[in-house]
Image (cartoon, rainbow, N blue to C red):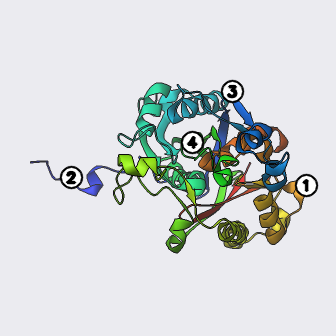
Amino acid sequence: MLPEVSFAERPLSQTPAPVDLRAAVLGVGAALPARRETSAETERRLGLPAGWIVRRTGIRERPMVRPDEATSDLAVRAGAAALQQANLPPETIRLLLLATSTPDHLLPPTAPIVAHRLGLTRAGAIDLAGACSGFLYALTLADSYVRLQQTHVLVVGANVLSRRINPNDPRTSALFADGAGAVVLGPVHASRGIVASWLGADGASWQDLYIPAGGSRLPLTPERVARGEHLMHLQNGPALFRKAAAGMAEAGRRVLAQAGLTLADVAWWIPHQANHRLIEEARRQLGIPASRTINVVERIGNSSAATIPLALALEAHRFQRGDLLLLTAVGAGLLSAAILLQW
């Protein structure tokens, strides 16, 4: 029988967190596969007119893993780069959150594998399946942990979506890509860090974008695999487009209102890099200029939860200390999220 232990006997932290403590980004990292499939190659493979994909999505190339690469490989590379930039030894990290829809295995979670390979010997580690909003959900949870425990957290968004798409379906194979981005969060006083966050969900729309088979509802069988039910299905593209654009704009407005700020206070908007048309429509509805929008989708494609940390890492040279960044995402579920981050 296990001994009874009261909460008072195992405190969450040694001292109460200061009220002005925030979780700040101390380092960022990116990992993109060396292999690329250009949209021109995809068009030739699918028999599409030249320029069809770029006109509709803005994507010019999609990074794709080699046959021997998996999600954990990309996550380790991105996490190591973020730790290096933060100039922190691995043992200072006390929690790893891995936002992914493509774990290495159904069991065990991939995060402990990543933590082991990074040498995070003192860290807890868990996967978070939040689709395209997963990184912002993970960042929100990490924010609370950093402030409560006064410690460091590594948050990684990583996906290998090239193995979840039907290569003959232009609705998905022209969009989805592979990649990983990571941030190290640590406690600082309130001159910078996460200012506010907002999370939402609309489970009524779960079938707009989903993988039918492979879970407990429809286990994998040879027949379901033959029908492609283990791959991504986009059920209602136009409806999903409208919901995602409106959802990102609404999430941005909600988190700004929560913080008592306006778009005039925002230096940069970093949306989920779904595709160029969606970013532009959400931008129009939000009302922020293109000059303050980070858009790197043409070179990274849509890697779901990995796109926002990738954009942070790839475009970090554009941010100045004190800049207020607005991060927004909507993805399968439907899950929506927004974060205000002072750089």
The residue at the point 82 percent across, 38 percent down is 317
Q: Which mark is residue 291?
A: 1
Mark nearer the viewer, 2 or 3: 3
At label 4, which amino acid type do we have? Asn
Secondary structure under the numbered disc 4 in the rendered image: strand
Of callouts 3 and 4, the N-terminal one = 3
Residue position marked by numbered label 4 in the rendering: 159
Mark nearer the viewer, 2 or 4: 4
Of callouts 2 and 3, the N-terminal one = 2
Q: Residue furthest front?
A: 47
Secondary structure under the numbered disc 3 in the rendered image: loop
Residue count near mark 4 (Cα–Cα under 10 Å), binned few <14, some 14–19, many ≥20:
many
Q: Are marks 3 and 1 in contact (CB under 8 Å)?
A: no
Residue position marked by numbered label 3 in the rendering: 34
Q: CA distance from mark 2 to mark 4?
A: 39 Å
At label 1, which amino acid type do we have? Ser
Residue position marked by numbered label 2 in the rendering: 5
